[in-house]
Amino acid sequence: MGAIEHYSYDDYAQWKGDWELIYGHPVAMSPSPVITHQMVATQIVIELSDALEECKECMVLMEQDWKISDETVVRPDAVVICNEPHEEYITKTPKIVVEVVSKSSAKRDETTKFELYEKEKVPYYIIVYPHDLKAKIYKLEDKKYSKVGDFSDEIAYLDEPNECKTQIDFERVFRRLRGKR
């Protein structure tokens, strides 16, 4: 029986295409996201950016590498980071991580990344289901995620990051998709 190969960030940095590295194991991120996925992710970034417009220490990024360790590099759909040095990748735990679920990523987003983000103490993890017009929001409490709720046309108020209050209006996030149904 052959050995399972184990990779590091140095290997990851050489790969062509879109990948993540989770506990030393490569995960392909292809094919590229569909239009619905990108539209929802973009709308969430707009909502977060608008909410944090006056916040001087936090910023919103889309599809940026977060190097957790030499064996784990993920690329969430959107993140809110605060007081981060300007590096090639995110080095500190984001305050908010958003993953927009596609058929190929659902299991990984709901289990592997859920556990990873919980372990890394991400204060808020938001899993968005574009085809269901729903987002599930989890908040870290006592080192475990507890579900804040399901959101589809409500405004979610998040008390992170730091003193900069954040909100996402999911009616606006899903507005264009509702019109297509």
Image: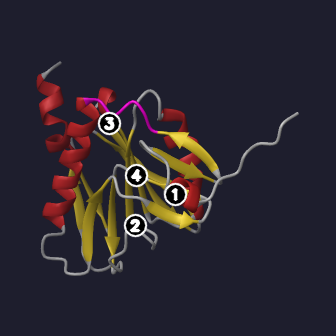
Judge from the rendering whether residue 134 lies leftward or rightward of residue 48; answer left or right. Answer: right
Question: Label 3: how many residues lie within 10 Å, few (<14), some (14-19) or many (20+)?
Answer: some
Give residue 130's position: percent from left, percent from top: 30, 32
For mark 1, give the secondary structure. strand
Mark on residue 134?
3
Give the residue type at disc 1: Val
Q: Residue at x 26, y 80 (%)?
A: 57
Q: CA distance from mark 1 to mark 2?
A: 9 Å
Mark on residue 76?
4
Q: Are marks 1 and 2 in contact (CB under 8 Å)?
A: yes
Which colouring convention does the figure follow?
secondary structure
Give the residue type at disc 2: Tyr
User: Is residue 101 visible to the viewer in this orientation of the structure?
Assistant: yes
Give the residue type at disc 4: Pro
Mark on residue 168?
none
Q: Residue at x 19, y 42 (%)?
A: 173
Give the residue type at disc 3: Lys
Q: Residue furthest top?
A: 181
Q: Magenta part mainly helix, strand or loop?
A: loop
Q: Nearer the viewer, residue 115 or 37?
A: 37
Give residue 121's position: percent from left, percent from top: 53, 67
Bounds of the magenta segment: 29-34
User: Is residue 160 visible to the viewer in this orientation of the structure?
Assistant: no
In the picture of the structure, the residue carrying the numbered disc 1 is: 73
Q: Quadrant of the N terminus?
A: top right
Q: CA distance from mark 1 to mark 3?
A: 27 Å
For mark 4, give the secondary structure. loop
In the picture of the structure, the residue carrying the numbered disc 2 is: 89
